[in-house]
Image (spheres, rainbow, N blue to C red):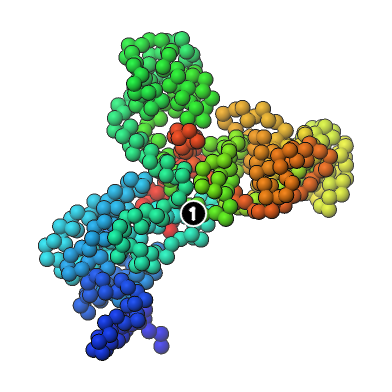
Amino acid sequence: MRVPLRWRRSIMVLITMAVAGMLRARGEFIPRFIAEHPRVLAGQTLSPAGASLLHGIVDSARNPDLRWPDFTPYQTEVAKFYEMNSYSLAWIENGGLRSQGRAVIELLKNADAKGLDPEDYDGSRWQDRLLKLGQTPSEQDLVSFDTALTISTMRYIRAIHCGRVNPKEFKFQLDVEGHQLPLAEFLHTHVTDASDPAAEIQKLEPPFLGYRKLLALLPEYEEFAKKDDGQKLQTTTKTILPGQPYASLARLGRFLQLIGDIPATTPLDPNQKIYEGALVEGVKHYQSRHGESPTGKLDARTINELNTPASARIRQIKLTLERWRWLPHSFSQPPVVVNLPEYRLRVMNPDGTVSFYKNVIIGKAYGHKSPVFEKEIQYVVFRPYWDVTPGIQRNEIVPHIQKDPNYIAQHNFEVVTPKGEVVTDNQVSPEVLEGIRSLRLMVRQKPGPTNSLGLVKIIFPNPENVYLHGTDAPELFSQDIRDFSHGCIRVEKPADLVAWLLRNNSGWDLERVKGTMNGDNDNLQVNLALRTPVLIVYGTATVNEENQIRFFDDIYGYDAELAKALTAGYPYAW
C-alpha cells in the first residue's frame, strides 16, 4: 500500500524528533541530521496541531492569506524547505519575527526598485501582518505568516533570477529552466541564517553591466513621470526645420531639460517663437538616443516619440529588465549579442564591457521576423553560396522567372539538384521551372560580390536556418529602420567580426580574413577553434556605450505581448 505524502512527512518528523530525544538523553546535542542541515534548530517548533496546519498549507499548495493564494508552481520547493527545517517555522522564533525575516520583508515591499510589482509579493500586506504578530498571535497565525513569507520570497527570488514568465511562451529559444535555482536549498543555506539576507538575494540578479545600468536609471524615469506635466507637443504634417516657428517650443524645452537632453544649467526662454539654438541641439541629442538620425528636424516621427509619456518609457525599462533575467548568467566565452529593436550587434569582453559594435539589418519587411535565441557560433564560410529557402524560392523566385525566363542568369543564380549538380545558370525552361516550383530542384546564388550574403556568413546551427552574414547592399546600413532581411541578420563590415571570431585560430588575422573574402576560393568553411555563444535578444530600452539610455520601437510587438502576460499576475506562465 502506498502511504500518502502527508503521512510520510508526519512519520519522518516524528522519527526525527524521537531520534533527537534519544541522542539528547545520551548527551549528544547535535544529531547528524541537524549537522547536515544547520538551520533545523533555528526558528520555532510547532505543536502537533500546528504541524498539521503547516502540512495542510504545504500539501494543498494554497495559503488563503496571500494575494495569490495558489502556489502550485512552488509546492515542491516549499515542501523541501520545511522538510529541511523538520516542519518547524523558519522565520518565527519565540513568537516573534527573526531579523532575517524583517530584512526580506523590506526587500519584498520595495520590489518596485527592481522593476517588479510589490503586490506580487504581498508588499502592502506585511505591515498589518507585523502588527498582528505583535498582538499575541495564534499558532495558526504564525504558520500562515511563516509560509506566506517563504512563498513570497521564493516568488521574488525566481523573478529577479530568471524572470516571471517563461520565454518559451513567446516561442523564444531561451532555456530559463536550465538556470533555475534550487529555491529550498538556497533559502535554507543562504538566507534564513544570513547576516545580510538582502545582499545574498541580490547576488542572484543578472550580472551584466547593461542590466545594472538600466536598473539604475529606473528611479530617474520614475522621477520624470512625477515631475512632468504631461502636456503634448503640437503635431504637424509639415516638418519643422531649425529657424522656423513652432507653437510648442516652451513645452519642448521643459521636456528636454527634464529628461536631460538639454543640460539643467542651460537658460531657456519660455517665450521663444523660433526653433533654434539649445532646442535644436537638445532634439538632436534626443533623436540619437532613440535610434534616429540626429538631424534636429521636428518631423512626425520625432514629435510622436517626444509625446510618448514617461510611464511608457518606464514600462519599456521594466520589460527589458525582465528579458535580461531570461539570459544565462555566465558564458563559456564572451558572447556576441544582437539586440533586434536596436539594429545593433555587440561583441563582449570577458569583464562584460563592449569590445566593439556593428549595425545590423534584421527581418520584418518581407514578413519574416528574426528569431530570439541562444546558440553557439561554430564556423564561418567565406565567399558562400546563398541557398535560397523553399519559401523564398516558391513565393519570390518562381514569379520572377515567370515574368522573365532569364532572371536566373541576370542575378547570378543557378538551378541545382538536391545533390548540388548544376542544371542551368541560364534561361529556365518550363520543365525546369516546374522542378523549381515543386522543390525537386533548388535555386542558389553563386559566390562573389553580388551574392546577397556578401562575402562571408557566420553559422550557428538552428531550426530556422538563420545566420549572420555580409551584404551586397551596404548602403542600407545608413537608414534608421533596418528591417530589410528575410530573417537572417546582415552585419555591417563583417570582416572585423570574423577576425574576432577566428582570433584563436592560428594565422587568421584581419588581413587574412579580408584577403580570403576577396580571394578566389569559394565556399571555404573554417571551423572556430573556440565556439562562441551568440544571443539574439529583444530589448526596447538599453544603455549605450556612452552611458545614455536609448529607447526603440517595439518592432515585433513583443513588448505588448509581454506586458499583457505580466499584467495577468500570478500564476504567471510558470
- Residue farthest to the left, as pictured: 135
Q: Quadrant of residue 96?
A: bottom left
Task: Give x and y (percent) for residue 403.
Answer: 79, 32
| Image quadrant assignment for residue 32 | bottom left
Q: Is residue 451 left or right of residue 266?
A: right
- Dot 1, how many residues are within 10 Å of its Cα: few (below 14), some (14-19), or many (20+)? some
Q: How many marks?
A: 1
Residue shown at 20%/77% (left/top)? 47
Is 343 in front, or is 20? 20
Q: Residue furthest front?
A: 507
Q: Which residue is mark 1?
A: 329
For residue 148, side relative to residue 182 (left or right): left
Q: Amino acid at mark 1?
A: His
- Viewer-proximal residue among 71 and 379: 379
User: Judging from the image, what secondary structure is the residue with disc 1 in?
Assistant: loop
For residue 464, above or below residue 150: above
- Coordinates of residue 246 in the picture (x, y in percent): 41, 13
The answer to whether residue 131 is seen in the rendering is: yes
* Residue at image coords 87%, 49%: 421
Question: Which residue lies at the image location 29% right of the left edge and 80% below the top edge?
Answer: 30
